[in-house]
Amino acid sequence: MKDFKIIEILRTFKKEELKLFDKFLESPFIKSRRNLHPILEGILKYYPEFLSPELTKENLFKELFAKEDYNDKKIMNLIFDLTKAAEDFLVHKAVDEDEIGSMMYLCRAYYKTKMLDSSMKVIKGVEKIIEPNFSTSYDYFSKLKQILAYKEAYLTEQNDFDKLINIKLKYFEASATQFIIDYTELLSYKETMLQTYDKKIESNFIKSVVESFNMEKFIKLTEKASGLNTNLILLHYYRLKTVENPNDLKHYYELRDFFYKIIDTLSRSEKYFVFSHLVNYCVQQFGKNFEEVKLEGLNVYKKMIENDAFSSSESEHMQTLTYRNIIQFCLTNKDAKWMEYFINEYTEKLSPEIRNDLKNFAFADLHFMEKNFDKALEFTSKINHEFFLFKMDLKNLLLNIYYELNYTEPAFSLVDSYKHFIANSKEISELHKETIKNYLKYYLIILKIKTKQSKEDIGEMKQKIKNEKKIVFRGWMLGKLEELSKKG
């Protein structure tokens, strides 16, 4: 039964949600005439994993109908009804949690019953709480068009054609703005897929739209206008230019400066979206414009934190990758003070199940940067290695700690196991594998030079590492070679 949809749904419920679902089953609006409490109670004995081999249709039937012979149709009908009730509960929960969506449903109900005055009162309430937002999940422009459509119906009923014309104009502006934002997203996605995966996103219809629309001319005309829609269009256009011309940093700064200029007019999810694009751009430029973007990336993250835009909503945790990247940028810039502040103040924003591991990993990195190598090793020992998300980051850190502490045998052993890990992993891209393999190759040579097991020319090694395009810890390894050179 572990693959049944009802199990899949119940597995996502927290304990409080299970209590609410149990009460929901008492609702007179539940379509099933069957009592679903007993089967729910029977299934929940295996909560939260639902992996026990005892969880079977046969065992549930025996528990519910002890005096009857097994009837597959009877138990499946109960399971089907419980599944449908769970889906209805999910719908109810989604509507209940969506204040604007609930109000729009009420508005529609009033509209259908010709209670237009009541419909307009609800619309006024919606207008007080709705915020402009280009996030797909928020669907601002779709909701705005619904609001304007209800207003249009009301004004038509009132024969107020002067106001009606203005409402129609706003409706068309909303439609046009949504088109431009979607269009820039289309072009961005097309370019990204082509550059990253060498895949063309094309159809005759899309091709016709792209060839028919002069984006550059439209933007020149738009820049002379003003207003929120204009700002959103320009923001998306500037983002598009960074995708189309990734090696021209002027487009990045154009986007960044305009974004910072209008940042107070944007919602949290919009800020998060643009901040994420900016830092991703900086990461992608590491191999080409390292010195220029290493501090820029950290400053963007600091601005993100300053604006409480580290997640798309207040209810969402900070993503582990965001946390990890902030730590990496702090290390790259040797900003120990702000790194410690970030760890102490923002680790709690992570999901609880990975909070301690990431905090210990971050402090291990911090102590390594401050050359407290024993302390760094101590913090790595507190990490649950088996389940740690960034296993390669941890292995890299341990290798560097072992080198600094002269733990030669553990270092050689870890290099060997790391090579096997890379070779057998199907989750790591070939590009990333090559980067790590290069690091391990040069790390091993440097370790052998240090332990007098190799007589490689240090000057030649430095040049090889400088010329290597795909490598991590370039600066650290060059520093170690310089130390070895001075020791003779």
Image (tube, helix red, strand yellow):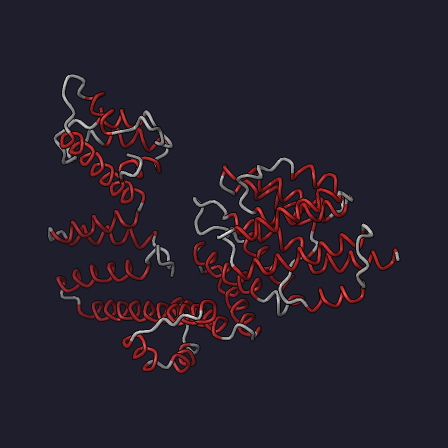
Instruction: Residue at 51%, 69% (x, y): give it.
Output: 255
Q: Quadrant of residue 401?
A: top right
Whole-percent x and y of residue 459?
Answer: 80, 66
Q: Is residue 374 left or right of residue 250?
A: right
Place of residue 296 in the rendered image (x, y in percent of width and height, measured from the top left): 62, 63
On screen, residue 440 versus residue 481, left or right, reads left
Front residue of 60/453: it is 453
User: 323 or 72: which is nearer to us?
Assistant: 72
The residue lying at 75 percent from left, 60 percent from top is 478
Task: Depth check: give the residue in front, 415 or 92.
Answer: 415
The N terminus is located in which quarter? top left
Looking at the picture, how far across and down is residue 136, in whole percent?
Answer: 35, 58
Residue at figure coordinates x 17%, y 26% from the top left: 35
Reply above or below: 285 against 131. Answer: below
In the picture provided, is 264 more to the left or to the right than 472? left
Q: How many callouts does the rendering have?
A: 0
Q: Whole-percent x and y of residue 419?
A: 61, 51
Please give the name of the residue rendered at 41% of the width and 72% of the height, measured from the top-left corner.
226
Task: Give the quadrant of the C terminus.
Answer: bottom right
Q: Residue furthest top?
A: 67
With respect to residue 14, does 425 lie above or below?
A: below
